[in-house]
Image (cartoon, rainbow, N blue to C red):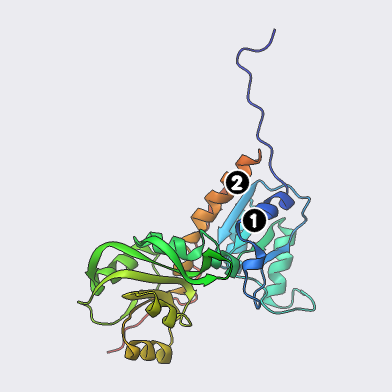
Amino acid sequence: MPDPHPVPAATPAPTLRDVVTVLERLYDPAWAEPWDAVGLVCGDPDDTVRTVAFAVDPVAAVVDEAIQRGADLLVTHHPLFLRGVHGVPATDFKGRLVHKLIRGGVALFTAHTNADSADPGVSDALAQAIGVRELRPLDARAGNPELGIGRVGELAEAEPLAAFARRVAAALPGTSGGVRVAGDPERPVRTVAVCGGAGDTFFGAARAAGADVYVTADLRHHPASEALEAGGLALVDVAHWASEWPWLEGAARTLRSALGAAGTNVETYVSTLVTDPWTAHVAAG
């Protein structure tokens, strides 16, 4: 007689190959910029993956955390290697990280500018975190109007630039650099352009999209000054790491869902370690 209350069979864990297949479907390597380096950095495709960690930067503290928390795979936004290498000796810090990952049984996968261009991608998460909706690409990719770097959208209603800057500061994880603002604090803003990471090459695109304000990171003096002189845009400059961190939770959730639909299961966590390189800010004057 069959058991009237059978114990459900445990959902099997995927292999690294299975996980990479899903990640590359979500963040197609073909969407990456030509100079970029994305995909699997280290790891055996036949290994089982039970826990996946997500972080912005593949730095020592993040790798140590992944090992301590028993992760089998670390997915980062930023690449460990952007240029060709001829070896990974443990005599330099990047080589040491590769050795530490392998010894700890942690694979490393990178989704960088392909995740920037994806829909949803890095800038979707940034825009949604600060309350911007009705999103469209800032710099659309040829052949697909939904893909591209950056996003443009609308706030529910216009608000002064100073209030908007406070909104951004409250929505993103804190860093020592905080949020910098360029423009009249009382200026009303409603149409918002965003670009996770360094985005000072898209001032023209933001202006052409009719944005009142552009939120991005790593703004330099001369490009920012010239953007203001050209008119039309206020600027909000945030920490690079903070601008990309909101993407992680959505990426983890989407991976779990896609694997679950295929009949496998993983646990995920998002690292909350602040890996912004700046550790203090002292206001002049």
Report whether residue 265 is seen: no
Q: Is residue 140 left or right of residue 63?
A: left
Q: Residue 118 at x, y = what percent?
A: 55, 62
Q: Residue 234 at x, y = what percent?
A: 31, 80
Badge 1 crowding class, 10 Å Cα cut-off, few under 14, some 14 to 19, many 20 or more, is few
Quarter of the N terminus within the rendering: top right
Check disc 1 and report the residue beneath it.
25
The numbered mark at residue 118 is none
Above/below status of 161 relative to 129: below
Numbered disc 1: secondary structure: helix
Above/below status of 235 relative to 270: below
Hey, what amino acid is under mark 2?
Ala
Hey, what amino acid is under mark 1?
Arg
Quarter of the C terminus within the rendering: bottom left
Residue nearest the observer in this picture, 51 or 35: 35
Q: Residue at 52% of width from left, 59% of height from top?
A: 119
Q: Residue at 53% of width from left, 49% of height from top?
A: 253
Check disc 2 and report the residue beneath it.
258
Q: Residue at 33% of width from left, 81% of height from top?
A: 233
Q: Is residue 30 left or right of residue 144?
A: right
Residue nearest the observer in this picture, 5 or 226: 226
